[in-house]
Image (cartoon, rainbow, N blue to C red):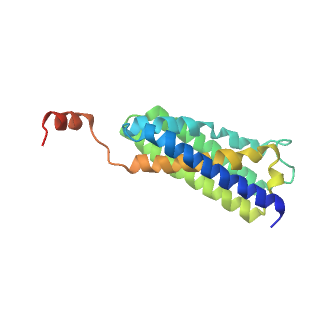
């Protein structure tokens, strides 16, 4: 394995650790007590910036020898994820918005897994990413962690506010 790839993967690992700490200490404590739609909202807003993946298609930002199979798959997958995030955001807090949140989260997570597969399959070298090096080393770990939070929010039992009010009036 070339030295540059070791540093590349080390950067991804350190970013996952750092974003994991931030998510555990600051993001999850803020989201865990919110209603599902309100907890999803900031995650969807964050993912609306996935248009940044289009940088993989811009000559001069990336190396001319960046494998096109990777570049196109990552760029178009990200722009679709950004659009799905915006659609889900617009539809919240309705049940359709939560369903759109599921569709976005499944697509967005699968897109990241596919990008890793395409990069590996194409034999991508870190230097081929050029100025877009920050996308997989800084942004993708944050997106992975927030997809995990999104799944956790979508799967958690949803308390209805009127039920909570009745429970507080009638202590056991």
Q: Is residue 138 left or right of residue 87?
A: right
Of 31 and 143, the residue lying toward us = 31
Q: For the view shown, which residue lies furthest in the bottom direction?
A: 1
Please tell me which residue is depicted at 78% across the width and 54% down the height of the picture: 68
> Can residue 66 be seen from the camera position used here?
no
Give x and y (percent) for residue 31: 43, 39
Of 5 and 157, the residue lying toward us = 5
Of 130 and 9, the residue lying toward us = 9
Q: Is residue 83 left or right of residue 53?
A: left
Give x and y (percent) for residue 119: 73, 59
Please tell me which residue is depicted at 87% across the width and 50% down the height of the picture: 64
Quarter of the image where one finds residue 135: top right
> Can residue 139 be seen from the camera position used here?
yes
Quarter of the image where one finds residue 48: top right
Give x and y (percent) for residue 165: 21, 33
Please tell me which residue is depicted at 56% across the width and 43% down the height of the picture: 22
Give x and y (percent) for residue 28: 46, 42
| Label total for image | 0
Q: Which quadrant is the C terminus positioned in?
A: top left
Q: Which quadrant is the N terminus positioned in?
A: bottom right
Q: Is residue 140 left or right of residue 66?
A: left
**116 relative to 41, above or below:** below
Please tell me which residue is depicted at 72% across the width and 63% down the height of the picture: 120
């Amino acid at each position: 394995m070339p030295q540059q790839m070791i540093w590349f993967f080390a950067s991804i690992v350190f970013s996952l650790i750092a974003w994991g700490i931030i998510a555990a200490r600051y993001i999850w404590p803020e989201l865990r007590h919110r209603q599902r739609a309100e907890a999803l909202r900031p995650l969807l807003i964050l993912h609306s910036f996935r248009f940044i993946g289009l940088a993989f298609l811009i000559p001069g930002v990336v190396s001319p020898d960046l494998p096109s199979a990777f570049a196109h798959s990552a760029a178009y997958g990200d722009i679709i994820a950004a659009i799905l995030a915006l659609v889900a955001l617009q539809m919240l807090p309705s049940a359709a918005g939560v369903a759109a949140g599921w569709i976005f989260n499944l697509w967005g997570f699968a897109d990241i897994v596919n990008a890793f597969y395409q990069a590996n399959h194409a034999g991508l070298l870190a230097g081929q990413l050029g100025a877009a090096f920050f996308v997989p080393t800084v942004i993708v770990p944050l997106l992975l962690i927030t997809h995990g939070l999104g799944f956790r929010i979508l799967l958690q039992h949803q308390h209805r506010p009127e039920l909570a009010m009745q429970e507080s009036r009638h202590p056991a």
